[in-house]
Amino acid sequence: MEIKLKRGQKLCKKCNSVNAARSKKCKNCSNDFVSKNIPVKNEITDWRNIEVGSYIKVIQGTGPYFLCSKESEDLKIGERICMGDTGVFKIVGKDQDGLKVNGASNKNAGFSYLYMGLPKKSKNTGIYWEPYRIKKVKFKGRR
Ligand SMILES: [Zn+2]
């Protein structure tokens, strides 16, 4: 069934409920409109088909995060604290839930793992595991 939207409304892509066009989160499922709906140039959506040996960049603000539980100068309670990797990586392998990568710039040297599976919450650590969003890059760093 198609839902007709009135002016000033938008549809949540996750749960199909109608929201105010300006809202930042879905009132029904808390889907975050802000970070997920902004299109990114060269974004890779089919990470399973990435060739090993190619270079990617993690889109800032994606990947695993905490929800802030203490009010501070910079952060409000409930705000996301990203704790994932950022920067350019070389793909060195894959498994069913993500990408094995090596840092390709001076800032992020070393082996890392980029989670690309379904969103989930870790009961032990309270970390929200959200898949990274990545984009293609041409490597210009060190060899
Ligand atoms: Zn929703």
Image (cartoon, rainbow, N blue to C red):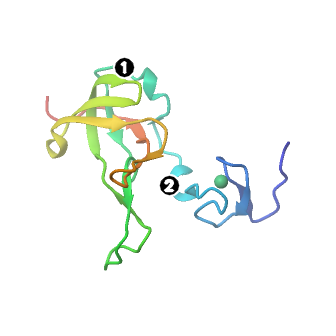
The quarter in which the C terminus is drawn is top left
Give x and y (percent) for residue 79. 42, 67
Image quarter where ligand 1 lies: bottom right
Residue 137 pos. (x, y %): 34, 34
Number of marks present in the image shown: 2
Above-or-below relation of 78 to 35: below
Q: Identify the element where label 2 is drawn.
A: helix
Residue placed under numbered mark 2 in the picture: 35
Which residue appears at 59% of the width and 62% of the height?
25
Q: What element carries label 1?
A: loop
Quadrant position of residue 106: top left
64 is higher (above) or lower (below) than 117: below
Q: Mark 1 points at which residue?
A: 51
Task: Report the residue at 33% width, 53% height from top.
Answer: 125
Q: Which amino acid does label 1 sit on?
A: Glu
Counting from the top left corner in percent of width and height, residue 83 is at: 30, 53
Which quarter of the image is occupied by the N terminus?
top right
Residue located at (41% from left, 30% from top): 97
The answer to whether residue 102 is above or below residue 40 is above
Residue 24 percent coordinates (x, y): 58, 64
Name the quadrant containing residue 115: top left
Question: Which dot marks residue 119?
Answer: none
Q: What is the CA distance from the residue labelled 2 to the residue labelled 1?
A: 26 Å
Q: In which quarter of the image is residue 10?
A: bottom right
Q: Give the camera-side residue of 6 and 99.
A: 99
Q: Residue furthest front?
A: 124
* Kind of residue at badge 2: Ser
Mark positioned earlier in the residue sequence (2 or 1)? 2
